[in-house]
């Protein structure tokens, strides 16, 4: 009996395995027809029926489930952190051009570099999303990573697997090589952004500024299930490292990628002349608003891979490609009102309340006027018709008033004499353009803004703790300063609106993770005036612990490379306040780190380096990492206290200034010799 049953079970298993493989191949085929060719052969209902049959059969035979099965897009548990990975090849940035003259100048450099060879070009839409690297081994997706700094990125494989248009296995018909790195841009359709932001606002989180931020934020979710709920898409734009296959041109590599099942933007175009490339730029400068996704420019690439290799690259950008950036999109709308917003330092910023208008794919309702002088210079009045744009495709701003549409009913706005939140007097110090509330630590608006800053990504990076949650915590008297966040209990968090058990657990976990922050992040998070991310890093590296910095006189702080007297005065003034000292005590009691990691001791210990120009061997960030590994200090500001200026190609004005100050100037070979590396 048993002897008979075993062969039958084996036959059943073989039959199930064959049926599973057939289903998977059919589903992959139809996904390719839908996502890549945009030419589906079956209805959505028929596709869903195939997927359901596959799920049912895999449930009966869990031992036959494979990692590349279409059902396995979501399955990884939430991650506590992302592993750092090194890209097979550096993901370089692109040099930018902002008009046709700059594009023609790039073309002349290409012609010179190729000594008059005939050149064809590939023109592509520059997607407004997040760049990723996808590694396939024998056709199966093994690793997906963010671009990061171009050399190292974060392993977000589990999140990338949730994107339906991303193939988990390359099509066998394309004969995938043993190893290939595919590069693409993950993006979010325009219409999806508003829905996601409504959900974030309802959950007390800060809305995404644009589709690019939304795509990047979605990829960095610790729980892949959250990423899966967002309709991310992918377009492949390049083949990176490949082993076991050779492509002759970029156009050929894109054609292969499409055949392998990777979605390639249908508007990519091969052109035989540069003038036709300019025609592509002009065409899409007009047509880009008709697209269902965001684009911020055009990329023009030399097509021949041999010619690309001949042109080479700097440490930051290839010489064979250029990115033309679209002018910032503008839209016309009406100023409904002007009000004042109070920031964490007490700054009163005039803000215009606008009739909602879509600009660069985002609905804009408010725009900053920066300060009173700027408001007067532009002469913005309540009731005005104005042109608005998103500076850098991010921050909404008023470009100008359409004075020809004034009716005479418009009203000027006057800055208040008292803080609109706490009623304290406002002041404008000599030499400053900003009015400030004098309420300080008693002003609710300043308290909230300081908390938002403390929890922000560049500070303590407390995920999920946004303005709405912080406002509720303040309103309920659960917190009064940043240190109180670390005393919150799960039960207290559960009392907040729209807060379920899992959300409360996530908030407490995020706060607990923030205890292990760095000294530099803590310094930045304290919100000391004039202390940005870089200055915080410099201060942390120089002083090593918070006590030393708090006790340092302004002369010592001002002697730190890249700091100077204004920042030094602000730092000393901040730590001289009893309220600041009490906050630091509470943070220390809460278990926050107040010491920087010990700096490596080496032959460059205590030496300050500034970099200028482009290096050939590695990027400036990599060069800085090497200096830090040998105990040195890297600064962005050149002064008489700088020990070395490392000058690469096109060094700029810093080179002349270094010579005047008597700072030692190193060429790249001299810098490599100082590091002990071969030139």
Image (tube, rainbow, N blue to C red):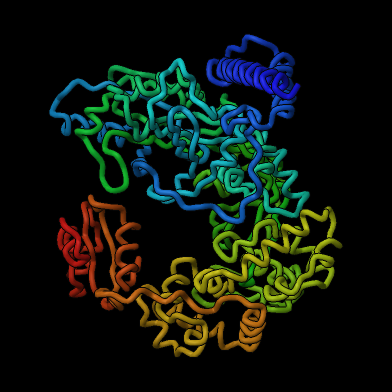
x, y percent for residue 624:
32, 62
Question: Residue reaching furthest left?
Answer: 115
- Whether residue 70 is visible to the viewer of this picture, yes or no, is yes
Q: Which quarter of the figure has residue 290? A: top right
The residue depicted at 45 percent of the width and 90 percent of the height is 553
Left/right of residue 217 with respect to residue 663 in the rendered view? right
Quarter in which the N terminus is drawn: top right
Q: Number of numbered discs present?
A: 0
x, y percent for residue 576:
56, 88
Task: Give above or below for 421 relative to 124.
Answer: below
Judge by depth and name the residue closer to the eye, 238 or 656: 238
Task: Give above or below for 606 relative to 496.
Answer: below
Judge by depth and name the residue closer to the eye, 78 or 530: 78
Task: Give above or below for 649 relative to 607.
Answer: above
The residue depicted at 83 percent of the width and 67 percent of the height is 492
Judge by depth and name the residue closer to the eye, 56 or 242: 56
Quarter in which the C terminus is drawn: bottom left
């Amino acid at each position: 009996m048993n002897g008979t049953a075993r062969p039958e079970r084996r036959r059943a298993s073989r039959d199930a395995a064959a049926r599973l493989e057939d289903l998977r191949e059919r589903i992959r085929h139809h996904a390719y027809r839908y996502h890549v060719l945009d030419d589906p052969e079956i209805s959505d209902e028929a596709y869903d029926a195939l997927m359901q049959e596959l799920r049912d059969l895999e449930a009966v035979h869990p031992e036959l489930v494979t990692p590349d099965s279409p059902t396995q897009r979501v399955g990884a548990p939430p991650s506590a952190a992302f592993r750092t990975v090194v890209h097979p090849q550096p993901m370089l940035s692109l040099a930018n051009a902002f008009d046709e003259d700059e594009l023609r100048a790039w073309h002349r450099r290409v012609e010179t570099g190729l000594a008059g060879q005939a050149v064809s070009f590939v023109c592509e839409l520059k997607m407004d999303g997040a760049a990723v690297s996808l590694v396939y081994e024998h056709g199966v997706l093994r690793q997906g990573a963010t671009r990061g700094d171009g050399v190292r990125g974060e392993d977000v494989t589990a999140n990338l697997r949730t994107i339906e248009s991303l193939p988990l296995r390359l099509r066998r018909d394309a004969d995938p090589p043993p190893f290939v790195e595919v590069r693409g841009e993950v993006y979010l359709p325009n219409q999806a952004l508003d829905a996601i932001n409504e959900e974030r606002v309802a959950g007390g989180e800060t809305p995404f500024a644009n589709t690019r931020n939304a795509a990047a934020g979605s990829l960095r979710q610790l729980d892949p299930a959250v990423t899966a709920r967002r309709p991310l898409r992918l377009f492949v734009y390049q083949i990176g490292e490949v082993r076991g296959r050779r492509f002759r041109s970029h156009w050929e590599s894109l054609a292969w990628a499409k055949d392998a099942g990777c979605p390639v933007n249908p508007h990519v175009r091969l052109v035989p002349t540069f003038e036709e490339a300019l025609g592509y730029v002009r065409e899409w400068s007009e047509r880009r608003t008709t697209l269902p996704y965001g684009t911020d420019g055009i990329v023009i690439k030399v097509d021949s891979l041999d010619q690309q290799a001949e042109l080479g690259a700097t440490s930051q950008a290839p010489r064979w490609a250029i990115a033309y950036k679209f002018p910032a999109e503008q839209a016309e709308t009406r100023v409904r009102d002007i009000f004042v917003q109070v920031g964490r330092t007490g700054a009163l910023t005039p803000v215009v309340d606008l009739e909602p208008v879509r600009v660069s794919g985002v609905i804009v309702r408010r725009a900053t006027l920066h300060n009173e002088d700027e408001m007067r210079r532009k002469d913005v009045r309540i009731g005005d018709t104005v042109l608005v744009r998103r500076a850098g495709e991010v921050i909404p701003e008023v470009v100008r008033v359409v004075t020809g549409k004034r009716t005479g009913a418009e009203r000027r706005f006057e800055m208040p004499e008292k803080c609109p939140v706490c009623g304290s007097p406002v002041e404008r110090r000599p030499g400053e353009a900003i009015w400030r509330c004098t309420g300080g630590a008693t002003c609710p608006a300043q308290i909230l803004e300081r908390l938002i800053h403390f929890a922000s990504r560049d500070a303590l990076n407390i995920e999920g703790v946004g303005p709405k949650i912080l406002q509720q915590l303040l309103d309920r008297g659960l917190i009064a300063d940043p240190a109180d966040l670390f005393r919150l209990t799960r039960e207290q968090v559960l009392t907040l609106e729209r807060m379920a058990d899992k959300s409360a657990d996530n908030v407490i976990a995020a706060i607990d993770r923030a205890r292990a922050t760095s000294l530099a992040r803590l310094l930045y998070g304290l919100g000391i005036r004039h202390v940005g991310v870089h200055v915080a890093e410099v201060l942390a590296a120089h002083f090593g612990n918070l006590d030393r910095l708090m006790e340092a006189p302004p002369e010592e702080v001002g002697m730190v490379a890249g700091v100077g007297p204004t920042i030094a005065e602000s730092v000393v003034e901040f730590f001289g306040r009893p309220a600041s000292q009490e906050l630091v005590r509470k943070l220390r009691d809460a278990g926050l780190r107040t010491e920087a990691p010990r700096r490596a001791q080496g032959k460059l210990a205590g030496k300050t380096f500034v970099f200028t120009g482009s290096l050939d061997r590695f990027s400036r960030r990599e060069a800085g990492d090497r200096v830090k590994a040998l105990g040195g200090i890297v600064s962005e500001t050149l002064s008489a206290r700088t020990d070395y200026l490392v000058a690469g190609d096109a060094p700029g004005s810093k080179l002349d200034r270094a010579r005047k100050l008597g700072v030692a100037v190193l060429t790249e070979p001299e810098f490599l010799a100082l590091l002990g590396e071969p030139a």
